[in-house]
Image (cartoon, grey):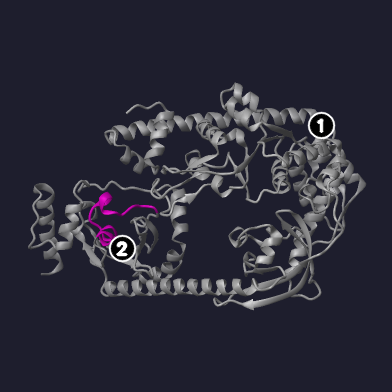
Amino acid sequence: MNSNDYQLKMRQAWSTFVEEGIINEDVVRPEINRSWLRSLGVDPYKPSLHQLPDRIILSKKADNIRLISIARPIMEQLCVPQDSTFVLLSDQEGYILEGTGRNRTASIAGQLNAEEVIGTNAIGTALAEQTFLEINGAEHYCSYYHNIFSAACPLHDWKGRIIGVLAIYSTGHELPAGSLVSLQLAKRVIEDKLHYKAEQSKILHVYHNTCSAIIDIYDDPIIVIDHKFTIANINDSCLTLLGYENREGVVGLLIDQLIADEPQVLNNLLSNDPNQFSSRFTLQTNKGRVPCALERRRVVPNPDGTQQIILVFQPIESVALTTYGEAMAQGKVLTGTPFECIVGDSQAINAVKNMAYRASKVLSNVLIGGESGTGKEIIAHSIHEASGRRGQFIPINCGAIPKELMQSELFGYVEGAFTGAKKSGRVGKFELANQGTIFLDEIGEMPLDMQVTLLRFLQDKTVTRVGGSESSTVDVRIIAATNRNLKNEIGAGRFREDLYYRLNVISLVIPPLRARKSDIPIIARYLMKNLCCQMKREAMEISDQAMGILLDYNWPGNVRELKNVLENAIVFSEGAIITENVLPSYLKDINRSENIRTQENDRAEVSIRESRQQQKIAAGERERDEILRLLDQYKGNITEVARHMGFSRNTIYKKMQSYMIKR
């Protein structure tokens, strides 16, 4: 039977099935028969496409990055130079990850090609049948795809588990000759490469464990750095020096997170140039900074062709330093202490340092206030480092996380909690910060419903992952920060009063730069030193005239603005001195009243906040209308509404409760 006759008989068989529910077994193949029966409930005339939101697509691509990177060049070779041929790669659920070919209309990343969504199709049916198969023309359950000819084969990992599907398509006519053989060969090549990568990973794992056993023999501290400048290994002596219990807390960190010197010191330490090489550096430990001297340095090859740098070193014995308490009582900050990075010697900033030091010795919650650019995160990090807490310092910008993701970001989620969730679930920030510190920046931006959840956490320190039922208690210290007046936010109904008093146990307010102008010369020279080092320029000075201009300006952007101005000046300076000529012209416009400028900035900030609030209200109204429309369209089926919007059922229920929508 030729193809045209077969398609004619299939169309007749398809019409009989969708209209009468009868299958002509003499025409319909057994695998198509089974698939049509599984597809009952799908509209046979119009598919109900399900498309993931961009953020979930990116997450899925990240989870499948190895598969995509191996398959992409092979997919390009599979494409026939015709407009109607294209190749798709899906994950193990049927979500499209990648598409190649001139015809891009069907290769939409994030589209779900499962049978329960669009009926019989190459990817979905290959997953259901767990085998290679063709789906041609009227064999598709939806008539929308009756002009598509396709073939698909599942892809397996080294354990034999299905991890995705590779499929080839042609529009309007049969697949080109040789396509099926090429597809099966492509499957074999992709799986072989995946298996090779898996074997290579196992070899590297054995190699890593062997290296760990070897370096643990040595009494000297040892750090192993990979070609990406991350810490690949570390021995027990170094773990003890750093104050960590196991390698997991250190391996994977960038080396500059342990080396507490200026970037040039680290560059010299890793340099192969004997004229630049440096043997002295400062190690950041959980107990403070420790001066160290390099004893040996070796570059060794890895099994994968990359190289590692092995550093063998010793702490430099030195005279005991003054304690934090004695230093702070004198209004000083010791070199090598966590408070060294808070630059300035004015009475105002020394008072903040003193309070920060006292706050580091207790577990009470801290609320840091201050304008943008004053260094609230630096203060928070210094408190954490001086506290001696063993866990991580984890900063979270409450204004940068989408509202619908904040719950899962903070508390994590279990497998299957929502569409796009990782199969293994995910640990939340609060669990990651166990025995450490969570820094909640821009706390005034946190949505009201999350404020309730945070308040509950502060009361019992208990974490329950999204979609889960088991709870666990964590030891987390909370430091929050805001540039808003939270009492005004409470009055406006945007911030909970009970949460405010929970967070505001210890209150620190960082003075703006204009309130401590005597610190400007110190801060400017500190910033210039670091910037010149980063730009690999000789150290620079600043002229008296230029410094006078900096002192006259009111700095609405605070230290952040000062850094930007100096970076710009260094770039455009010809010599070794920053003069007034390279400073931005607006700094020199001293005839304009700084008070007027400050008032204008305040009015602009209020206007921006009001605009943002109006946008949030409008977005909420649009979302409420969309939920109501979908509830009506799907006759109250929450699962369908959640699938259409790309959320979990729990999220839809919460949104309905928030918008006071009753089923």
Asked which quadrant contains residue 254, the reply is bottom right
- The residue wearing badge 1 is 592
Rendered-image quadrant of the N terminus? bottom left
Q: Which residues are magenta?
A: 110-128
Q: Is residue 261 magenta?
A: no
Q: Nearer the viewer, residue 392 or 151?
A: 392
Left or right? Give the position of 117 relative to 654: left
**Residue 78 to residue 128: above or below:** below
Inspect the image, locate mark 1, and give the three-letter code of the amino acid beneath it: Arg
Mark 2 residue element: loop
- The residue wearing badge 2 is 84
Left or right? Give the position of 514 relative to 297: right
Q: Nearer the viewer, residue 518 or 252?
A: 252
x and y percent of residue 545 in the render?
Answer: 91, 45
What's the residue at 72%, 71% (across, down)? 312
Inspect the image, locate mark 2, and give the three-letter code of the amino acid beneath it: Ser
